[in-house]
Image: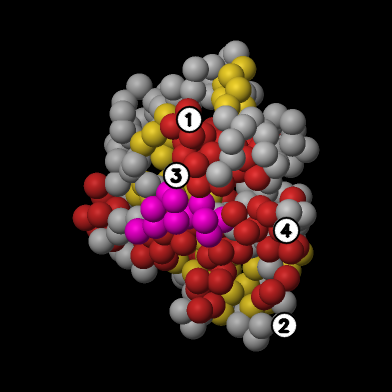
Amino acid sequence: MRILITGVAGFLGSHLSDKLIADGHDVVGLDNFVTGNQNNIAHLMGNERFSFYSHDVSNYIFVPGKIDAVMHFASPASPNPESPSGYFNLPIQTMKAGALGTHNALGVAKANNAKFLLASTSEIYGDPAVHPQPETYAGNVDPVGTRAVYDEAKRFAESLTMAYHRYHGVDTRIVRIFNTYGPRMDLEDGRALPNFLKQALLGQQLTVYGEGKQTRSFCYVDDLVDGIVRLLHSDEHLPVNIGNPIEMTILEFAEAINRVTDNKAGVTFKPGQRSERDPQRRQPDITRARNILGWDPQVTLDDGLRRTIPYFKEKLGIA
């Protein structure tokens, strides 16, 4: 297939490109580098199966030649309120990527009679009142809170995707992505893993907010990409959670990182939470992924961390 990927220079878009090209497909990548990193796709430049266009998906998308599938991954995604590339500091761009970007990407799929896959997020569940979160859970989201620019953009994108499927007959898929980690992550992303791993490799105490009882589930990027590709090749149109169902508290996670990195500095506690309405629990119910896709994550946390550490060391200048 010839596959268009928006947000191709992002953490997930670049790994997805690697997988699809390795599988024999051609990838056409779009990115405007507002949050994407050119280094993530530098190794693909010159590959005959990869072509790139610098483009803002909130503007009309034209790609020459036949497209067989569109995978819409373009969006700011960092919850770090201190990061210039996080959605707190790019609120309008985030909403436009979710609304106009999804509309334009769906238009390409419709014009080419192509498959369409939307990269959605566990954040559409908000701070969940149901645990673990199945795809049938409608969520607990504040539509006017500061996180809403990301949460509601993705919720709208899902609604628009299903409208194109039901009204125009577009062959759509929706993946709800839970916490994912691996090489090419933005070290300033603001999520627990890059924060902790960076501190641990620098020999610092790991900063835990509150008592560290909030929970997360961490999926290695290769597992996530495998699930997404399986979904692309499936006939499923309703949302599917892809993530690791092993839940742990943030404090347990911090202790695991200190153990794997042999960081003796321990942890330090700060009151409150890192950002407004930070979800207190997050764990995917992956029953549908198992039944429909035959998918289960294979990489353990320790193994995934060991695969990720060399990249972080390189970026931090640690020998």
Residue sitting at x 65%, y 68%: 29
Residue sitting at x 62%, y 32%: 265
Return the disc, 4 or 2, that comes first in the chain's sequence. Answer: 2
Across and down, in percent, residue 195 comes to 63, 37
Residue occupying the far left of the picture: 291
Q: Which residue is mark 2?
A: 46
Q: Which residue is mark 3?
A: 218
221 or 68, which is in the foreground? 221
Q: Is residue 67 visible?
A: no
Q: Which residue is mark 4?
A: 319
Say whether marks 2 and 1 touch (CB < 8 Å): no
Question: Which residue type carries mark 4?
Answer: Ala
- Relative side of 224 to 149, left or right: left
Residue 200 tag number: none
Return the disc, 1 or 3, that comes first in the chain's sequence. Answer: 3
Q: For the residue carrying disc 2, how many other residues have a C-alpha within 10 Å: few (<14), some (14-19), or many (20+)?
A: few
Return the disc, 2 or 3, that comes first in the chain's sequence. Answer: 2
Distance Cα–Cα, label 2 vs label 1: 42 Å
Classified by dominant secondary structure, the portion drawn in magenta counts as helix
Distance Cα–Cα, label 1 vs label 3: 11 Å
Q: Which residue is mark 1?
A: 250
Question: Which residue type carries mark 2?
Answer: Gly
